């Protein structure tokens, strides 16, 4: 299996990697706008049928295609994951169920 990830092939090109990671985060935030408010996983975060988990898989695949098409860049799974959760943190589209959050 050949190494394809740009981060691994050109580790010293840090400005490009940062630009792509920022673009990925913007991509995710823009895609979140297409959905109604979503509850973050509660009691079972590993429930693969939960809307958030299905959204995660679908959007990571779309983001990978976006990067290859628009940036001619193959992101690592870690870059995709980090950008996704940074976007979740900045997006008002996600709701934490009060019973799952920290108590006041």
Image (cartoon, rainbow, N blue to C red):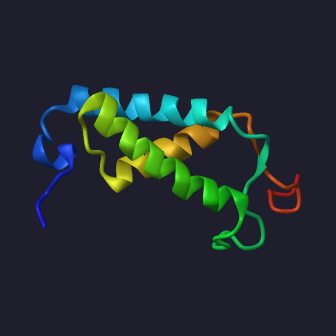
The spot of residue 80 in percent (x, y) is: 41, 48
Quadrant position of residue 24: top left
Which image quarter holds the N terminus?
A: bottom left
Kindly identify the residue that appears in the image at 63 percent across and 71 percent down.
48
Splitting the image into 4 quarters, where does residue 21 fall?
A: top left
Compared across the picture, whether 1 is left or right of 78 comes to left
The image shows residue 28 at horizontal and vertical percentages of 54, 37
Instruction: Pinpoint residue 2: horizontal percent, then vertical percent.
Output: 11, 61
The residue lying at 72 percent from left, 40 percent from top is 35
How many numbered discs? 0
Above or below residue 64? Residue 56 is below
| Front-lying residue, 70 or 92 | 70
Q: Is residue 74 left or right of residue 89?
A: left
The relative height of residue 4 versus residue 12 in the rendered view (above or below) is below
**With 56 as the anchor, is 2 left or right in this view?**
left
Residue 65 vs residue 87, the one in the foreground = 65
Residue 33 in the image: state x and y as whole percent: 68, 32
Which residue is rendered at x = 77% and y = 65% of the image? 42
Tell me what residue is drawn at x 88 percent, y 52 percent.
104
């Amino acid at each position: 299996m050949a190494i394809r990830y740009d981060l691994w092939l050109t580790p010293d090109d840090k400005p490009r990697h940062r630009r792509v990671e920022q673009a990925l985060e913007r991509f995710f935030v823009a895609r979140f706008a297409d959905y109604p408010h979503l509850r973050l996983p509660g009691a079972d975060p590993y429930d693969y049928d939960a809307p958030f988990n299905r959204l995660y898989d679908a959007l990571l695949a779309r983001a990978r295609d976006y990067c290859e098409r628009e940036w001619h860049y193959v992101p690592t799974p870690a870059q995709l994951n980090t950008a996704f959760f940074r976007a979740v943190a900045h997006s008002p589209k996600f709701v934490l169920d009060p019973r799952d959050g920290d108590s006041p």
